[in-house]
Image (cartoon, grey):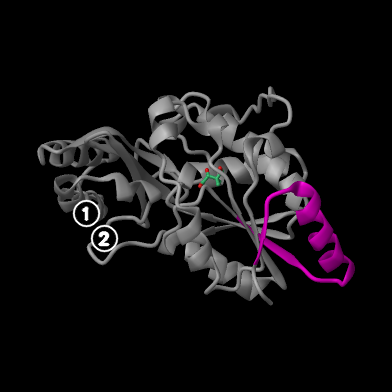
Amino acid sequence: MTMELLKTIKRLQQVLSRDRNSGLTIGFVPTMGALHQGHLSLVERAGQENDRTVVSIFVNPNQFNDPNDLKNYPRTLEADLKLLSTLPCDYVFSPDADEIYPYPDTRKFDFGSLETVMEGHFRPGHFNGVAQVVSRLFEIVGPDKAYFGLKDFQQYAIIRKMVAMLRLPIAVFGCDTVREADGLAMSSRNALLSKDHRAVAPQIYCILQEAQKEARIFSPEEVKRHVTEKINSIGLLRVEYFEIADELTLKSVNSWEEKGTKVGCIAVFAGSVRLIDNIVFDK
Ligand code: PAF
C-alpha cells in the first residue's frame, strides 16, 4: 500500500473507518517528527503487529515548558516523509495546531506522584501537555496498539496510567532505546548539539553503564553521587538530576534490597540542549 499523508481529522477518520470496517487492526506511533532510527524501530514494530500503521507528526506546543525549546525543536517534514515511505507506514497524520486544539485544552490530569518527580519536577506542566495531546490523538486515531520509546521512561509510565485512568481499549508498548554506535541515545535533539557537545555526550551512557557495575558495591545514594560527579567533571555536561527509582511507582530507591526493578533516570544539559537517558539496574 502506498503511504498517504493526511492533514485533517476528517480525512484520516474516513480512511481508518474504512479499514476498521474491513476488520483491519490499527497500530499507532505518535511523534513530533525529526525522525531517527528510534522512531523508525517503533514503526517497524507497529507494522509487524498491525494491519495498518499510523504515524502522527505534530510538534505539540502544550508540552513545552520552555518557549525556546519549542522554537528550536527541529522540524523536518520532507525528510521524515522520505524515511517513512521506506517503512510499513500506511498513514502519516500531520495536522495543524487548530486541528488538534480547536479550543484551548484546559484539562488537568492528576498522575499523582508519577508527575511530581524527575521530568515532572523540572518541566512543570510537561506531562499534562503530553497527556492532552496523546489522549486527543488516541481519540482521533482509535488505535488497537500504540508504541512509545523507553528513552522517555517517565512518559511511558504516565501514558500507561492515562490509558488506565481513561479506561481506553488501547494496548501500550514501551520499546527499547535505540543508540548511536558510540552509545548516545537517539533523540531528535541530538541534531542541535554542537560538535564539542556531541563528542562528549556518549559519556552519559558510558557512566550509566559504570553505575550498573557500581551498584554491586555502593548504595543507591553513593551511585547517584558518583554518576553526577563524573558527568559534571567532564566540563561540557551538567547533570540536572540523576535519580534511581522504582520502575512502576517512580519513587526514589534508598536500598537495593527494596522489591522491584530499579531504573536510573538522568537529564543532562549539553550546552543548551537537554538530553535524557536511563538504565535498568537488574540486580
Ligand atoms: O515522545 C514524543 O515525541 C512526544 O512526547 C509525543 C508522545 C509524540 C507527544 O507529543
Q: Amino acid at mark 2?
A: Gly
Q: Residue at x 23, y 48 (%)?
A: 204
Which label number is shown at residue 202? 1
Whether residue 127 appears in this view of the structure is no
Q: Nearer the viewer, residue 105 or 75?
A: 75
Q: At numbered mark 2, what does the secondary structure look like: helix, strand or loop?
A: loop
Disc 1 and disc 2 in contact, CB within 8 angstroms: yes
Q: With 237 as the anchor, is 252 left or right in this view? A: right
- Crowd band around label 2 with a 10 angstrom C-alpha radius: few (<14), some (14–19), many (20+): some
What percent of the width, then of the height, locates residue 99? Answer: 71, 39
Q: Which residue is mark 2?
A: 183
Q: Is residue 114 above or below residue 278?
A: above
Q: At numbered mark 1, what does the secondary structure look like: helix, strand or loop?
A: loop
Q: Nearer the viewer, residue 26 or 119?
A: 26
Disc 1/disc 2 C-alpha distance (Å): 6 Å
> Is residue 148 rendered magenta in the image?
no
Q: Which residues are magenta?
A: 4-29
> Is residue 22 rendered magenta in the image?
yes
Q: Residue at x 26, y 67 (%)?
A: 181
Q: With 59 as the anchor, is 238 left or right in this view? A: left
What percent of the width, then of the height, locates residue 150? Answer: 47, 53
Quarter holding residue 110: top right
- Crowd band around label 1 with a 10 angstrom C-alpha radius: few (<14), some (14–19), many (20+): some
Nearer-N-terminus badge (1/2): 2
Q: Amino acid at mark 1?
A: Pro
Q: Respond yes or no on whether mark 1 lies under 8 Å from ligand 1.
A: no
**Quadrant location, the N terminus:** bottom right
